[in-house]
Amino acid sequence: MKIQRPRGTNDLTPDRSPLMRFLHRTFLDVCDRYGFAQVDTPIFERTELFTRAVGEETDVVSKEMYTFDDRKGRSMSLRPEGTAGVVRMVLENSLMHGGGNLRLGYWGPMFRYDRPQAGRYRQFHQFGVEALGSASPAMDAEVIGLLVEVLGHVGFADTTVELGSVGDACCRPAYLEKVLKPVLKGLGDRLCATCRDRAETNPMRVFDCKVESCKEALAHAPRPMDHLCGDCMAHQERVEELLTEAKIPFKRDKALVRGLDYYTRTVFEVHYPALGAQSALGGGGRYDRLMEQLGGKATPAVGFSAGIERILIAVETEKTVEAADLGSRGAYLVLLDAKGEAAATRVATSLRELIPVEVDFSGRGMKAQLKTSNAKGVRFALILGEDELAKAAVTVKDLDSGEQVTLPESELKEFIKALG
């Protein structure tokens, strides 16, 4: 039996790794400029963390988590999202003890047992940020702006923010009990069995249902944005004003209800419309009650996550990143005589102070090695053959211009440096 990767997982092959590194560098650079420090949390946590934070009635917890008992019978789950683990880390390490704002960024794998499709895997990767300690709409706008900026640096300049609100502890309970629940009760059998159960236990989750009959039945159901209290509406309007000042395009989306229970007030998604049905590249919202739900002090917070695989596919499809953007293109050293291994190592070591250098120790012929150098997209092919070794020289071929020159090994470093 041929061994293959598990369904819903993906391999990062060498041809795609430069793009992954470029995206990672871009995210880290933007985070640095916004003052977000990088953190990392365990890939698995106690299951209770996610049931309490994300919500037992969400699809993520009830259907999609990878859960197992460890050797002492404790229930553990692979993390399905990043926010819960970051908040747990903040509480456990008392990172908010000094008050003020705490800005954190993360990057890593997540796990959900979902139906695999383009850009959606069972092991997938996300980057995201969490800003804790501020209830200001300005923090919402800044977090949205950070995501828009990251996407802009990888070629998605014409993104649109879809912006909504799910209310707070003041207005959401009245909306659920007096408005939404009676409507759902009236829909009866037009809803699927799962949604009929959710209508009592967690009614807003019905808006996450993927069943077409439910989507049709709920098309005109009242949304939380239609029933916001004055404070929530003022918050929403201020976020919109700040996005306008920052020249970030947005539109109100009353139908936007993110699929996790911890959201309060602001919710948003960032779309690149040219991608069609797969246009959503990231999203998030405010979660002012999550710290308290996990046993800490009530702390306002807002954040986002973005799907890395979805972004990589979009970059490759739209060709938004040039090869030159992926970092220094470097050199490929074509070694034609095994006797030159020491010289090749010496040359490569010296040049690596300036540029990346890969040495071909395969023993293949020149044609095959030059073909590889072209395929790798390097700037220079450095050739060490019998003639070059005899003269302590190196032949340099500029693969952009096609020009070729042979010069003493001692002059190589300055020659490459002069070409930039």
Image (cartoon, grey):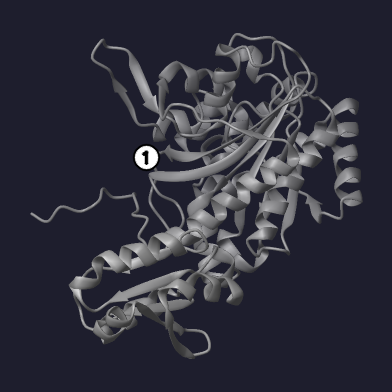
Which quadrant of the structure image shows residue 104?
top right
Q: Is residue 260 visible?
A: yes
The residue depicted at 50 percent of the width and 64 percent of the height is 355
Q: Position of residue 38 (x, y in %)?
A: 59, 34
Which quadrant of the structure image shows residue 278?
bottom right
Q: Nearer the viewer, residue 193 or 298?
A: 298
168 w.r.t. 161: above or below: above
The residue depicted at 43 percent of the width and 71 percent of the height is 331
Tell how many labels. Answer: 1
Residue 248 appears left or right of 22 = right
Counting other residues with Cα less than 10 Å from the Cα at mark 1, is it few (<14), some (14-19), or many (20 or more)? Answer: some
Q: Position of residue 118 (x, y in %)?
A: 44, 59
134 w.r.t. 385: above or below: above
220 w.r.t. 391: above or below: above
The residue depicted at 27 percent of the width and 81 percent of the height is 390
Residue farthest to the left? 1
Judging by the rendered image, the residue that carries numbered circle 1 is: 113
Type of amino acid under label 1: Tyr
Q: Is residue 256 visible?
A: no
Q: Quadrant of the N terminus?
A: bottom left
Q: Secondary structure at mark 1?
A: loop
Residue 265 appears left or right of 415 = right
Q: Position of residue 380 (x, y in %)?
A: 45, 77
The residue depicted at 49 percent of the width and 47 percent of the height is 211
115 w.r.t. 36: above or below: below
Q: Nearer the viewer, residue 373 or 24?
A: 373
Residue 365 appears left or right of 388 = left
Q: Position of residue 161 (x, y in %)?
A: 74, 52
Q: Nearer the viewer, residue 241 or 25?
A: 25
Q: Quadrant of the C terminus?
A: bottom right
